[in-house]
């Protein structure tokens, strides 16, 4: 009798899990992010954020292309050491380092 209860309970959990995973949308997600092409180097002002206290959120569009590093002294070093951990998008978003940082 105990085994039958455990089997029925396991079957119930399996069916319940399948019903939960079969949902087509994630709860609270209004719009998922989409990749798109954009002009590199253009920075646009974001729209004013409307804050809410519920679990609804929105993800903007993701850029499709990664920028190339500018040619010049130290480009190869950055490609070897920095691109090992970071994408060129992340590297080009950073402010220029100070002279003291570059000398060390």
Image: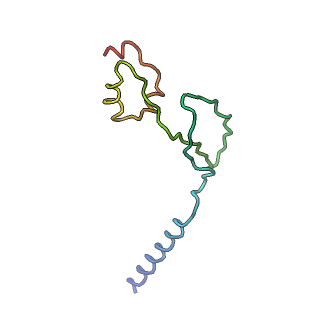
Q: In this view, does 16 lie above or below 8?
A: above
Residue drawn at the location 43% of the way across and 24% of the way down? 70
Q: In this view, does 14 lie above or below 78?
A: below
Residue drawn at the location 61% of the way across and 53% of the way down? 28
Residue at the farthest front position? 71
Judge by depth and name the residue closer to the eye, 45 or 17: 45
The quadrant in which the N terminus is found is: bottom left
Image-based side of 22 in relation to 99, left or right: right
Picture quarter containing residue 52? Answer: top right
The percent coordinates of residue 101 (x first, y second) are 36, 16
The percent coordinates of residue 13 (x first, y second) are 47, 72
Judge by depth and name the residue closer to the eye, 82 or 98: 82
The percent coordinates of residue 45 (x first, y second) are 64, 30
Image-based side of 88 in relation to 19, left or right: left
Picture quarter containing residue 90? Answer: top left
Number of marks present in the image shown: 0
Residue drawn at the location 54% of the way across and 70% of the way down? 19
Judge by depth and name the residue closer to the eye, 98 or 75: 75
Colour convention of the picture:
rainbow
Residue drawn at the location 43% of the way across and 76% of the way down? 10
Picture quarter containing residue 26? Answer: bottom right
The percent coordinates of residue 69 (x first, y second) are 42, 27
The quadrant in which the C terminus is found is: top left
Image-based side of 58 in relation to 84, left or right: right
Q: Is residue 50 above or below residue 42?
A: below
């Amino acid at each position: 009798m105990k085994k039958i209860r455990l089997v029925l309970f396991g079957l119930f959990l399996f069916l319940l899990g399948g019903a939960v995973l079969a949902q087509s949308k994630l709860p609270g997600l209004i719009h998922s992010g989409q990749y798109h092409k954009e002009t590199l180097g253009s920075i646009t002002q974001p729209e004013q954020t409307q804050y809410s206290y519920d679990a609804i959120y929105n993800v903007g569009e993701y850029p499709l292309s990664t920028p190339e590093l500018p040619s010049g002294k130290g480009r190869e070093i950055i490609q070897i050491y920095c691109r090992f951990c970071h994408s060129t998008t992340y590297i080009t978003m950073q402010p220029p380092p100070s002279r003291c940082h570059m000398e060390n």
